[in-house]
Amino acid sequence: MARVAVHSGRLLFSGRTRGGSAPASRKAQRQRRAPCERPLHHDLSLDGAGSVMLPTTIICGFLGSGKTTLINYLLRHPGSERLAVLVNDFGAINIDQDLIKVETENRIELNNGCVCCSIRDDLASGLVSVSRLPDKFTRVLLECSGVSHPAGVLRVFESDPIRSSFCVDGVFCLIDTSNVLDLDYQSTELAIDQAAMSDLVLLTKTDLVPQTVQCEVREMLQAAQRSMKLLDVVDAQLAPEILFGPRDHAPRSRTGAEQGGGAGPSHSELYESASFHWTSPLAADAFARLTQALPPRVLRGKGVLSLEVDGEQRPLRAVFQLVGKRSSLDVEETEGPETSQIVLIARRGELDRSAINAAIQACPGARSAPPLAPRRALLRPSVCD
């Protein structure tokens, strides 16, 4: 049974977890982390009539996990985004700002401290600077220092005046599979904390270690938090839709250069996305149950819906978002659209379109249309699943 709570116009779903418990290993006997209950925020809706707040993607992970490599890849393949990059390096000299290849005016350097504690005010000042250029950027990309704790960073976005101009719509953690098992206890605890606070954990450098090590890393992380979502990424080749969310419904051709130096299916597996749309409003609790029934490996989702909400005389417009292990609905005071639509991204073969359409049609009053053609994203699956 799906649990739905209403808070300030937002319907929050309980975290979507996989059944069963993660196996324990020699290095996994650590304190369990509770799932992050941070609500999802919403940036741009699929029909372009969303919030004016600037969406923010946070990239965290312990030292050397590949954050800068990932950000450089995203800067080369931003999709439809115009990115402002905030770079934090823990030291008096910000090495990362020299490694990140972006125009100087699009980059703000945060150095000689950590954004989650000692230079939190600098982060706020940097965000204020970005907010003064609302037409130049469509998204903020924040790279935290390797010793940052996401909880401290998130507190900045909950404070005035930042919370009125920015919304965090995704926290992503990188874990170096070739090194995390060799860290000292305190460093490993920090890496696990970073992962537990994130929506999706990206396992990097899996091509450098045998399958047994990859599985031990996964076991350690999921022993700390069973609902943790893990995804293997090689050479930072990650479709921007996974981090930034789907932006449209039509397949977009990708040239060899856009795919990252010609890298393709020869050493990556394909993920896919599918769109679903239907007429007539759904009851909010019915859509909550539908969301809870989605395959556990759905990585990203977004939608604009017409919902029937208790106590309202007319259907209301709601924005659905799913990031990793969390999903939510942001219910607005405006009338719902004539056609509801959602876009989902998942592993290839995990999106049973017929089953999802059948579930939609089973909801009272819904009449669904066939999903659009899937869009492909180049990623690599886990070897342990």
Image (cartoon, rainbow, N blue to C red):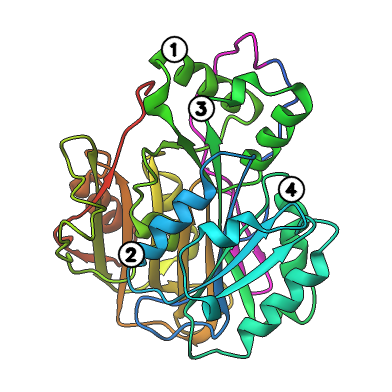
Single out the mark in the foreground, 3 or 2. Answer: 3
Crowd tier of the residue under label 4, counting other residues whose Cα lies within 10 Å: few below 14, some 14–19, many 20 or above? many
Q: Which image quadrant is residue 241 in?
A: bottom left
Q: Is residue 21 visible?
A: no
Question: Residues under labels 1 and 4: Cα distance?
Answer: 29 Å
Q: Nearer the viewer, residue 5 or 240?
A: 240
Element at badge 2?
Answer: strand
Crowd tier of the residue under label 1, counting other residues whose Cα lies within 10 Å: few below 14, some 14–19, many 20 or above? few
Q: Which residue is mark 4?
A: 149
88 lies above or below 315: above
6 lies above or below 114: below
Q: Is residue 383 visible?
A: yes
Single out the mark in the foreground, 4 or 2. Answer: 4
Q: Which image quadrant is residue 343 in?
A: bottom left
- Bounds of the magenta segment: 1-28
Q: Which residue is mark 1?
A: 212
